[in-house]
Amino acid sequence: MDRLVSNKPVAAARTSAGVRSSALGLAALVFVTVAAALLTGFAAILQPPLRLTVAAERFTGPIFTSGIYARETNPAGYNYRWTSGSALIQVRGAFFAAPAYIAEMRLRSEHPAGPQAIRFRVDDRELATATPATVFRTYRLLLPADPAGDGELRLNLQTTPFVAPGNPRQLGVQLTELSLHPVSRPNWPAAILVGLGLPLLYLLQRRRTSTSGAAILSIGLSGLTLAGLAALYRPTALPLPILVGLALLALSAACFVQRNGLRLGLSALCLIVAFAGMIWPAWLSDDAFISFRYAQNLVAGNGLVYNTGERVEGYTNFLWTLLSAGVIALGGDVALWSHIAGTILGLALVLLTYRQATYLLPAPWPLVAALVAGTSQSLLLYTARGSGLETGLFALLLLLGAMVYLNADGRVGSLAGAGAIFALAALTRPEGVMVSGLTGLHLLATLWMHTGRVSGGAKFKPIAVAALAFGGAFLLIFGPYFLWRFTFYGDLLPNTFYAKTGGGLRQVLRGLQYTGDFALTLGGPLLLLIGVPWLRDHRAALGSWRGYMLPLVLIYSAYIIAVGGDHFRGERFFVPLLPWIAILLADGIRSGGEYLVARGIRANFRRITLAALLILGAFGALARTDNQAETIRGLDESVWIWREIGWWVADHGAPDASIAASGAGAVAYYSRNTTIDLLGLTDKHIGRLEIADMGTGIAGHEKRDPEYVLNERRPTYIPRIWDDYFGGPAVLRAQYELVPIVTRSGRELEMWVRR
């Protein structure tokens, strides 16, 4: 009894200390949450203006211009730029970053007939008119909130142009400065998300850790990082609240990692992926709009076709196209939603790569695998940075299917689940059939080896049951789809297969170069470490998960080589293999490290060296598209130019008018008119041509038949930018007249119109 009594003060002291600790922890949590929320919300007012100066080659940020010529120097010594009669400044995502802008322009008129009125227009809506002076003056104009609802700012300066002696250009006004100043205000939706999200992250982490200090430190770092990224936010494809919300969802998934260091590393990786479309140029591929065009026609009741009445399978992503049709049917902006979906898919791929690796590798190697995958610009380009393609969905379904299969352990339900997931992958990309078949062969071989000592019917029964579960689930989903597409389109393979293949050895050589370029992004010779476990014990490696994953990667890579790769930047065909390659590489590095330790290399030295190499490699991988940033921007700009062509046809063309296009996605989607695909992806005649030098050019851009297009398809319109396809203006003048056009946004282009 005395002992019990004597311990009361100690117990009371501990209780008091615990209360004080809890109070301090709660105060720290409140402080961190409020600080991060306010910093995130008020970071929006720190945005600098977007400027075009005469000394710069282009605007800062994601801005495209048209009708603003290169820098010139006046004999008096000052620099300036001429505009054409219609100058366009286009800023994607401008109204996601600020509700309004003040445009500030320093300009003057030099028109020989005297100053001409200049009209300021936004999205084909006139805001103001002014008559500029003959001396430079600064004009300011308030650009109102997003009138089109797509977040894009399109400022057009229109004036009566003139042609100076000895200068064939259409000249408008002289411009020395143009700035777009955001009319900023606190971003309360983003601040509220942070204010609500961080306490939820704390509660999740408290369920996984023993101390509140570790949880507060973790969410504090996450909150400050979010605030820092908000301060860097500039016009991009997605609004800041959406990026913050997606990042918080990914951070909540990372909370289930028990070890603090691994959780922090995975959280940092998720933040990079979530904001990749802001850190690097975001983009949309024109090919994505081919699928959107099919989806558009499906929603309109015309069937899953590119042009009404033409049954050509010019897409290879049935499931992605159906999902796009759902967005269109619900009235959503498919371009915006494809960006959101891409970010979600990128985050899911990184998190599932980590999750799959935890089943196969000890800590901390799952984080290494996630690091290799998440810092690959190939993955980011085709998920979080946009593209609008099905690549991320296909990669996720393959990873998920392999995950379920490797963890099935002979369970019939799990094998059926894996078969169903692989069937969805096959609906997303035709290569899913190949992966499903290889998985089925691995399943049969594994069961055969495991039942080697059993004789009679007892040996074949488990094999038959497993094969029926896996193959039956696959065929139950894929079989009806295949029968439908064969009866609807009449071909075993999509038209794109015929359009892109047929080059023989030349095509294979192109595929080898494509594969080599991708291998260099992951360290080149470093990939040889994947073979270390096989060198140490090839029988054990063959009997483990490596015996499934490595052959799958090698056979799929051989297929990519055989078809000659792809023309897109970032080697997109390898994105579905990235999670598997990342896991295999992490395993190889681990096995190599164990071998070095066994040979006397100190473990601490090995760990430090490995950490340094991984960090350097990750930063190198993230920076690998720096030299391609302008190319990515150019690809994105092309899509929006082609959109404007489509809009012009929709505004001025008859319902039965047709247009020929080399970029056959955005033109078709935004015009809704019949579109002749000059490269044959959606045209059976061109897609099935036999050409002599197939495999030596750009993949998917080699087959063409200008005579067929001109004399059989007879397009009403041919954009001037693609007249080289037909041999130039001299060929077209007999049947077409070249006319200048001005699009909805004020972009000046030229169009060949059939006589």
Image (spheres, helix red, strand yellow):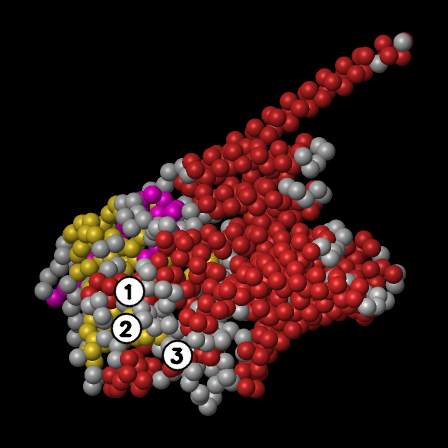
Report the amino acid beneath label 3.
Answer: Lys
Q: In this view, does 668 lie above or below 724?
A: above
- Which range of residues does the magenta coloring cover? 90-112
Please state if 536 lies on the left or on the right of 146 as rendered. right
Dot 2 and dot 3 residues touching (CB under 8 Å): no
Closest to the observer, 682 or 345? 682
Q: Distance between the residues labelled 2 and 3?
A: 17 Å
The image quarter containing residue 175 is bottom left
Q: Which mark, by number, is residue 684?
A: 3
The C terminus - image quarter? bottom left
Q: Distance between the residues labelled 1 and 3?
A: 22 Å
Closest to the observer, 548 or 280? 548
For the question of whether residue 371 can be seen, the reply is no
| Residue 624 is inside the magenta segment | no
**Label 1 belongs to which residue?**
671
**Label 2 belongs to which residue?**
659
Dot 1 and dot 2 residues touching (CB under 8 Å): yes
Q: Label 3's element?
A: helix
